[in-house]
Amino acid sequence: MSNQKLEFTAVSKFFWILFFSCILGITARAGAVADTTGKKLLAAAGKNENAGYITLEPNVVFPEVLTGNEEEALSYIEKFSVNRRAYLIRTYNRSKKYFPKVTTVLKKQNLPQELKVLLALESAFNGNAVSKAGAVGYWQIMDEVAKEYGLKYAPTLTGAEKMKLQKKGVAKTGTKKTAPVKDDRKNFYKSTYAAARYLKDRSRNLDNNLLLMVASYNCGIGNVWEAMKKSGLTDPDFWDIKGFLPAETQSYVMNFIALNVIFHNYEKFSDNTLLFSPLKVKIENFDSNMSEALPEATIKK
């Protein structure tokens, strides 16, 4: 895996006000642009002798703990930002209630705060969520993990087990019903503390490799170890073992990276000014004096 880091140039808000006003004739504040891809900007530019070109440089910035993954992840994140825009906005808004609390718990375990997005990926902040595999609650914790980390839980029953209990209940009419077991996995604080402890244990198992820890949360530490063994490498990272992991886990880790990067650049994302690659734009009636207002762009006329 290449460790080369991309260098990004931030585009000032003043530039965006001027730039989009020239292209679309909008006098609103910077960022009030409906087109997120830039295609309409390019299509709108016609032939003009006074036309000029500017190249906007990428301005996406990775969280520090995820730097070094740009080459493998940028294309995926860019597509995710376009195809899942509504989901990202909805998730970001809902996260404001939960993420600060999760971050506090993660800090106590000396874990990267980026792990907070697992809460969104696991249950979409729904404490009553139950997966097909039987995982329950905010952090989608399985029965055996709940038991290991001291959580009270109501065992997840298979369809056959539920049918068997129903038949017993019919046969023993008049039997006093027992109170349902309180499931700590549906308790935000208790489940969050348990999830943090689980992740801390995985950090010890996986030499603090963040992406491998995330993968193990989805498919289990055993499957990650098996994938590492199949890679044949002494110290493989996620990209080395990706092809040996379940498809669901591969997507899970990629989504983890995407959410963190987009949320880290959320202001630019919401203003439609987030760029993942250079964008060449043609401007009609280009005024050479604009060069003074565009110090961070490469200008060609």
Image (spheres, grey):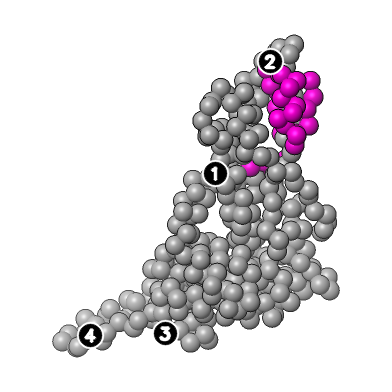
Q: Nearer the viewer, mark 2 or mark 1?
A: 2
Q: Is mark 3 on a helix, strand or loop?
A: loop
Which segment is the magenta one?
274-301
Magenta-colored stretch includes residue 252: no
Label 2: which residue? Answer: 285
Q: What element carries label 1?
A: helix
CA gap between label 2 and label 1 equals 29 Å
Label 1: which residue? Answer: 270
**Considering depth in this image, is 250 or 173 the residue closer to the camera?**
250
Q: Nearer the viewer, mark 1 or mark 3?
A: 1
Residue occupying image coordinates x 58% and y 78%:
108
**Residue 229, above or below 78:** below
Question: Which quarter shows the C terminus?
Answer: top right
Tell me which amino acid carries mark 3. Answer: Lys
**Residues at marks 1 and 3 touching, judged by CB atoms closer than 8 Å:** no
The disc, 3 or 2, on the residue closer to the chain's N-terminal end is 3
**Residues at marks 4 and 2 touching, judged by CB atoms closer than 8 Å:** no
Tell me which amino acid carries mark 1. Answer: Ser
The disc, 4 or 1, on the residue closer to the chain's N-terminal end is 4
Label 3: which residue? Answer: 152
Q: Residues within 10 Å of mark 1 (few under 14, many from 20)?
A: some
The disc, 4 or 2, on the residue closer to the chain's N-terminal end is 4
Q: Where is residue 238 in the image (x, y as percent from the top left)?
A: 73, 64
Residue occupying image coordinates x 75% and y 71%:
228
The quarter holding residue 159 reads bottom left
Label 4: which residue? Answer: 177
Q: What element carries label 2?
A: loop
Residue 52 in sight here: no
Q: Is mark 4 on a helix, strand or loop?
A: loop
